[in-house]
Image (spheres, rainbow, N blue to C red):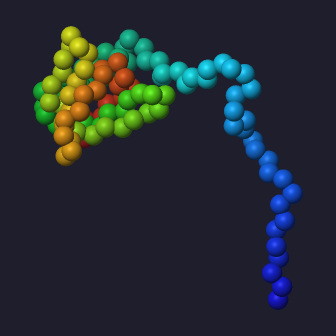
Amino acid sequence: MQKAHTRWHGLFVSEHTKPLTNEIITDPQPLLSGDERRSIHELLAVAFERRCPIFIQSWQDRHFHYHRGIIQRIDGEKEILVYSDPFGEWPLALEAITSVHMLE
């Protein structure tokens, strides 16, 4: 039995690997309505009061990031919250949070 060999004559790239212009391409942050933002802040307050584990999705550096832990404090003036996980305490900007889920 003979083995078949594939011979490549070219490579088709479906997307340009480099922008055709000098324009900066940015991915916009997901826009939340005022009601959605209020709901997130209310849920954060409840999770902080109950000291229950939470799962947070945030938008930073043009990508979604995921965080899991317990809220240690919320600083309304600096607009940050600090959560802890097994590796330490981490600050997170309230403005960057796009969704929250309580795990209890």
Which residue of the protein is positioned furthest toward the right in this rendering? 9
Q: Kindly identify the residue that appears in the image at 48 percent across and 22 percent down.
A: 30
Q: Measured from the top left, where is residue 93 in percent x and y?
A: 30, 22
Q: Kindly identify the residue that appears in the image at 13 percent across and 34 percent down.
A: 51
Residue situated in front as seen by the camera: 89 or 71: 89
- Please, is residue 3 above or below residue 78 in the view? below
Q: Measured from the top left, where is residue 67 in percent x and y?
A: 31, 37
- Please, is residue 3 above or below residue 100 in the view? below
Image-based side of 4 in relation to 57, left or right: right
- Please, is residue 67 above or below residue 97 in the view? below
Q: Kindly identify the residue that appears in the image at 47 percent across and 18 percent down.
A: 31
Quarter of the view holding residue 72: top left
Residue situated in front as seen by the camera: 7 or 14: 7
Residue situated in front as seen by the camera: 86 or 100: 86
Which residue of the protein is positioned furthest toward the bottom in this rendering? 1
Quarter of the view holding residue 81: top left
Count numbered badges in the picture.
0
Q: Measured from the top left, where is residue 17 in percent x and y?
A: 69, 37
Residue situated in front as seen by the camera: 34 or 81: 81
Image-based side of 58 in relation to 7, left or right: left
Give the quarter of the figure containing the C terminus.
top left
Q: Measured from the top left, where is residue 100 in percent x and y?
A: 32, 31
Answer whether residue 39 is visible to the viewer in this image: no
Give the quarter of the figure containing the N terminus.
bottom right
Answer whether residue 36 is visible to the viewer in this image: yes
Q: Kindly identify the residue that appears in the image at 42 percent across and 14 percent down.
A: 33
- Please, is residue 62 above or below residue 103 in the view? above
Quarter of the view holding residue 53: top left
Which residue of the protein is positioned furthest toward the front in this rendering? 22
